[in-house]
Amino acid sequence: MKVSETVKRYVSEAGKTSVISTANKIGQTNIAIFGSLALIDDETVAIMLGENRTYRNLAENPYASYLLTLPGKTGMQTEGCRIYLKVRRMEDGGKDFEAMKAMIKANIGSAAEMLKHRVVFDVVEVRPILDFGQGI
């Protein structure tokens, strides 16, 4: 599924809150605040992960949900989107891995050394944060 220009804007916004939700093979869930979502093209995104529960869950179950919110003055004014994802591949090195890690390191410094995996996802579906059938 191709993401809209609105979703591209949300992904690039400073000040957004990003949350990823995953589940392992038996359905136990995890949710985490996250910052490294990057659009690769109109149908593909990538994130960087350390050795954590999100990574372990994705190794067992390729589906994830990503929530992006931009705060509004009230809950009903909150902007954002829900991005439903499926793992295409996991990388532990290579040119694209190193480039993404370097970009993150430029923003967060040595904390980026904890990043050990690049996960590339296909975008399965995108929905508004508050869905009244308006599309996104």
Image: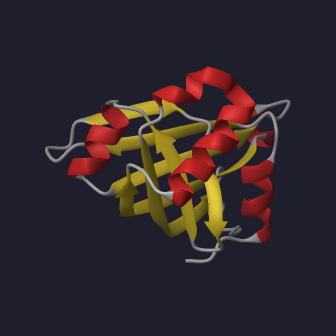
Q: Residue furthest left?
A: 26
Residue occupying the point 54% across, 37% down: 19
| In the foreground, 4 or 116 | 116
How is the model colour-coded?
Answer: secondary structure
The vertical placement of 90 against 42, above or below, is above
| Whole-percent x, y for residue 84 in the image | 48, 59
Residue 131 visible in this rendered orientation of the protein: no
Q: Is residue 77 left or right of residue 99?
A: right
Whether residue 90 is visible here, answered yes or no, is yes
* Rendering quarter of residue 103: top right
Horizontally, residue 84 falls left or right of residue 61, namely: right
**Residue 31 vs residue 95: left or right?**
left
Q: Residue at x 76, y 40 (%)?
A: 78
Percent position (x, y) of residue 75?
A: 73, 34
- Residue at horizontal 62 percent and vertical 65 percent from the top: 40
What is the total number of numbered labels drawn onto the structure image?
Answer: 0
Name the image quarter holding the C terminus.
Answer: bottom right
